Amino acid sequence: MKNSSEPRILFMGTPEFAGGILDVLIENKFNIISVYTQADKKIGRKQIISKSAVKKIAEQNKIKNFQPVKFNEDIIAEIKNQNPDLIIVSAYGKILPKSVLEIPKYGIINTHPSALPKYRGASPIQNAILNGEKKTTATIMLLVEKVDAGDILLQEEIAIKETETYRELSKRLSEISAKLLVKAISLWIEKKIEPKKQNEAQATFCQMIKKEDGKINWNNNAQDIYNRYRAFESWPGIFSYFQKNNQNLRIKLIQIDLDKNGKENNFQIGEVFEEDEKIKVKTGKGNIVLEEVQLEGKNKISIKDFIRGYPNFVGSVLK
């Protein structure tokens, strides 16, 4: 039974990043009165209906959850009726109207995994990796109408590892954000923290990620291609095309690596070749090593097994 004097917190979030934060709030005995998350979605080739990470955690902990398509009058009235003292938002994926922002007496606290005001928007982790950033930041901030423009409460900077993928970096940032959030909630409610305004002149915005952004341009250098793989390994993944019997076959590159020991060669850009018992692709500068691939409509397979079925893949030029 929760103490009636504890702040009533309503949580809004959707993916694994937000799920990790909700878990920590529950572990720390915060009074989570309800959860708002995005609607169940069809996932994968079999289009299996899947619940969000946040919904699963809410159900496991018997916390009431809502999945509104939009914030209409009924939804806003429902939030008011719950009388939240504070709303926490973490990778929710929906814009909150002003009428919701004005409900909780302590306002709304948001987690954002970037060095705000840098990388405002929906995909800061992917963009940091995509652009070859060496470091990033977990940020706890106040939510306002303008996207990611609220005052900052706490920040913690971390180094991005050279081979770190989106999933790995997201998990680390979620853990750090959760710890900062636990600290920030108490400080904010007790008025022991001074919010810091963002410098609008330094604001930058995330690239919106689309499925077609996963297509590889082999004229780019190997490091840029590897960064794209790391950034998009969760979604949309990276892919290319190769020709077989005058057909362009779409091939997804499930696992790749940088070629650290490659020698100078005269292959065409995009050409697949074998060297040192590895299957490689020449890029605008350097080579990429292929380790696991997937033809459209087929299962994932090691590159060695793929070559057995498609021996002419070596020598082909990916487009």
Image (cartoon, rainbow, N blue to C red):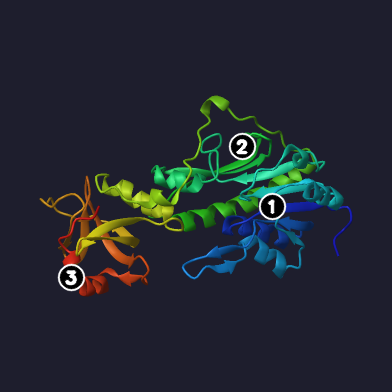
Camera-side residue of 11 and 133: 11
Q: Which mark is residue 12?
A: 1
Q: Residue furthest left?
A: 266
Q: Residues within 10 Å of mark 1 (few under 14, many from 20)?
A: many
Camera-side residue of 2 and 40: 40
Element class at badge 2: loop
Q: Which mark is residue 147?
A: 2
Residue type for callout 2: Val
Residue type for callout 3: Pro
Q: Is residue 305 above or below residue 159?
A: below
Nearer the observer: mark 3 or 1; the answer is 3
Of the image marks 3 and 2, the number of the one nearer the N terminus:
2
Q: Quadrant of residue 306?
A: bottom left
Element class at badge 1: strand
In the image, is 38 to the left or to the right of 129?
Answer: right
Q: Residues within 10 Å of mark 2 (few under 14, many from 20)?
A: few
